[in-house]
Image (cartoon, rainbow, N blue to C red):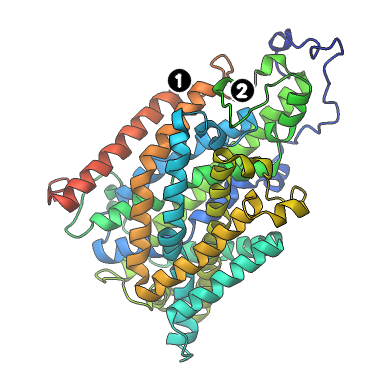
Amino acid sequence: MPDSSLHSSAGSNGDGAPPPTFDDLKIPDMSPRSLLRQFGPGMILMMTGIGTSHLVTAPTAGGRFEYALLWCVLLAYVFKYYGFELAFRFTNATGKSLMAAYATSPGKLPVWYVLVTTLVQCAVGQAGRLIAAAAVLYYLFSAQMGLEVPLWGWAAFLGALSVTVLLWGRYAALEAGAKIAGGLLFVSAVIVYFVRPAPIGELEHFLIFDAPPGSWLVIAGFLGLLPTGIDVSLQASEWGKAKRAGMARIRDRLETAGLAPAFDPFAPKMSDLTVDVRRLPERAVEYSRRCFRISLWDFRLGHVVSFVIATIFLLLAAVWLYPSPIEGRAVMGEIAGIFTESVGPWMMTIFMLGAFAATFSTAFNYFDGWPRIVGACCRNLFRPTAALAGIAADQVTAEHRRRWYSEFNIYRMTMLFSLVSAVVFIAVMPRPVYLVLVASALAYFVAPVIFCLNFYYCLKVIPKDDPHFYPSAFARVFTWISIAVFTGMSLILILGRIFDVALFGG
């Protein structure tokens, strides 16, 4: 249990009445079986990432450049770790999303920045995700069975299906099916890898920085979307708040009891986001801290699984496909050929099922995530939207549905905008690999800004004397190093592409 000295100041709530005890809170069980049942936003984050970057970018790197870009995989996962972890930390420490913190800046400039870049991502970024899932169906039904449906037709079908499912609220069943098929993808990849594993000596490329000619877009794609874009940390923060566990569940009760300040996005003060755990009853502190530890393990497990899958697909392509350009509309068929050649057609079937689940779940989750962020931006920028905040079923009233400027309707309109614009991009540019790489690079070049903002608000909002929620000395130092690495890599890639400066002497 927490040290009782931390709660010595938890007196009355200001009107003479004793503070609430929160005895109704069920303290989460930390056993392994219970942990798996309680996982949520971190696993969604993993499923959002395991898709285009793993099934298109990683095999493209292995097929075109063999083992030379292995270092990108390790660098992305190691140095992007805290970019995501800080989002979980902030939401668990405050019960608020990072978008509320962004609203405290002068002129709310970070909120405007996120709004503009997210709208761009809704079009270009979603095209890169959606085309990967469409490429699976195109290979199976158009390339193999002769069904005359263009790539953009499959994209339109999958996009419409995603939007319909999200708007009708049938997310849970579809997510469960996607996780099962995603597990098949993982198992099939591991089995095929051990049929002909990569030579141990080639793993030295994890530590050899190399940039072969023509690799800049693949490098940017790796750093942008492995495990996924840093901008998804904002989505993870919103998902964590929507899960209503930990501090996100009790924040309103704390404000009502006078144990935490109320936050007003139109009179924003950073101090109003802070929760001083020394004022809270012990049960509330223990509950929120356990929920935080669960969310960290949730995220860490997804991060490790995602790293393993990305590495395996790069190595598989290096062993079975190199040298190959990995391009064209039937890109999934070329990658699936690895499974047919190594084990047999039945294994390719398992791979295609898993590949479709992974790529579709990525596009599906982004159809929810980016519109959710646009809605969050608007509720922090515009009073009418703030007055009609909320998109969950139990928050939406008839007034929410009637007013076009409600957060719920902005969420829905953004979803439809993302669907139409992404399909148009795919119809105009039906090149799966290129669109995926461009979308990945776009995510990479906005990453340092989001990374810096997440770090800044964790340092400023979370009390420094809170050893559980405030970032440790190691976390702070490593985050500074990570920001420097990603900012430096951005500059290097810009110099290499625009000014033709050789990368790493390549």
* Pointers 2 and 1 in contact (C-beta within 8 Å): no
Q: Earlier in the sequence, mark 2 or mark 1?
A: 2
In the image, residue 422 sits, relative to residue 216, either above or below, namely: below
Q: Relative to 350, is 230 on the left or the right? A: left
Closer-to-camera residue (215/103): 103
- Helix, strand or loop at mark 2: helix
Number of numbered discs on residues: 2
Q: Quadrant of the N terminus?
A: top right
The answer to which quarter of the image holds residue 335 is bottom left
List x then y, in percent, for residue 388.
68, 45
Crowd around label 1: few <14 · some 14–19 · many ≥20 (10 Å): few
Residue 420 appears in the rendering: yes
Q: Residue at x 57, y 14 (%)?
A: 465
Mark 2 vs mark 1, CA separation in Å: 25 Å
Given the image, on which type of amino acid does mark 1 rest? Ala
Give the amino acid type for the residue marked by disc 2 in the picture: Asp
Q: Position of residue 62 (x, y in %)?
A: 31, 62
- The quarter holding residue 441 reads bottom left
Which dot marks residue 473?
1
Q: Nearer the viewer, mark 2 or mark 1?
A: 2
User: What residue is pinned by disc 2?
Assistant: 272
